[in-house]
Amino acid sequence: MKIIIIGPAYPYRGGIADTNESLCRALTARGDEASIITFQLQYPESLFPGKTQYSTGKKPDDLSITRMINSINPFNWIVTARKINKMAPDIVVFRYWVPFLSPALGTIARLLKKNIVKIALCDNVIPHEHFAGSNLLTSYFINKFDGFITLSKAVLNELEQFTEKPRIYFPHPINDNLGEKLDKIRAREFLNLDAGGKYILFFGLVRKYKGLDLLLKAMGEDAIKKLNVKLIVAGEFYDSPGYYYDIIDEYGIGGNVIIRNEFIPASEIKYYFSAADLVTQTYHTASQSGVTQIAYNFDCPILVTDVGGLSETVLHNKTGYVVSKEPREIAKYIVDFFENKRGVLFSENIKAEKSKYSWSAFAGALMELYKKIV
């Protein structure tokens, strides 16, 4: 079959770009003719909160990636749809994660020929930062699709208020570009960390809904201070860093928090997850998170708050912890992890679990959805 994926890919950076590329590889491995159409312009620079939208790595040699879509130019959307129609794909998979792109992607979908099956791969349906009109934009995107696949049951449930068309859930797969787990001492040497220290990791872009504030307050609990646990915050701040530094000062934890305020390239991810004892995702709200699957790739135990789809993947007291959003409870389980030496057991359990999360299985689920539609 001929399949086009529409969404971020090289030269754009980030988890969604990485996963689109992984999906394309999985479809190609099945024998499909798969390619990616990405953006000429994704976000205007004035609207982008980070330092850069672009990857510093090399273009993947094994993928067909074409830059075509301008997110703010309606004439471009018409031209793009015409080009896709000429390519005559059987399926076009649109990646959806933010209402800002609804006009562009929704219009392109409307202009595709009726014989092309249109499937939306939805990271989110209800945005993390809700705003007036976001549901209208989401409805505009969703209305012209034939089917939907989500990465969490929480997002699948959100779809119910917008559509009754075929929809399935498949848990977020593990990316294929993360590298192998490293020896902990070697990873810590690379990051200039104490070889024998206790480290927890908060990884990824720092935004309010991700709850770094909850984790910092938990770090201020006396029980954690006594254990001398250190927190690594590895990711670019999309919020004002001052808010978090105020919490660090208030709780007197400056000596136990290491902040790397920068986007972590794919080539360095293995060092952070191999160095960490425990990955922490103390979100206020969530759909799902690719960080969980990165942790699984490196057999690293995970602590998540019980919001959205985070608890669908983490097995409480088996591969990690599912806790409330109370800093005291977050601290309680971090202490339990280190005092009771849960790391080896949790890592072994993760090794048994992670085989479920392959991109080849996801590609198979996508094709089963296609069969339901046609």
Image: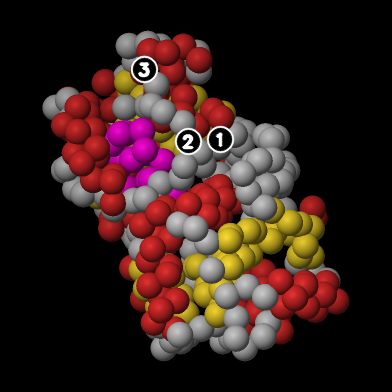
Hey, what amino acid is under mark 3?
Asp
Say what secondary structure mark 1 lies in: helix
Residue 293 within the magenta-colored segment of the rendering: yes
Separation (CA) of disc 3 from disc 2:
15 Å
The residue singled out by tag 1 in the image is 266
Type of the residue with mark 2: Leu
**Around disc 3, counting alpha carbons within 10 Å, would you say few (fewer than 14), some (14 to 19), or many (20 or more)?**
few
Residue plotted at (67% across, 75% down): 88
Left or right side of 319 for 292: right
Please tell me which residue lies in front, 219 or 231.
Answer: 231
Would you say 86 lies left or right of 258 here?
right
Q: Of all residues shown, which one is farthest toward the right?
A: 75
Quarter of the image where one finds residue 77: bottom right
**C-alpha gap between disc 1 and disc 2:** 6 Å
Q: Determine which residue is flagged by label 2.
A: 178
Of residue 166 and residue 265, the one placed in the foreground of this image is: 166
Q: Please give the label number shown on residue 287.
A: none
Mark 3, residue position: 183
Q: Which quadrant holds residue 153?
A: bottom left
| Residue 21 appears in view | yes
Q: Earlier in the sequence, mark 3 or mark 2?
A: 2
Q: Position of residue 196 (x, y in %)?
A: 32, 11
Please provide the residue range marked out in magenta: 287-306
**Residue occupying the far front of the picture:** 31
Does 144 appear in magenta?
A: no
Q: Can you say whether 180 is above or below 85 in the image?
A: above
Lower sequence index among marks 3 and 1? 3
Can the viewer see residue 138?
A: no
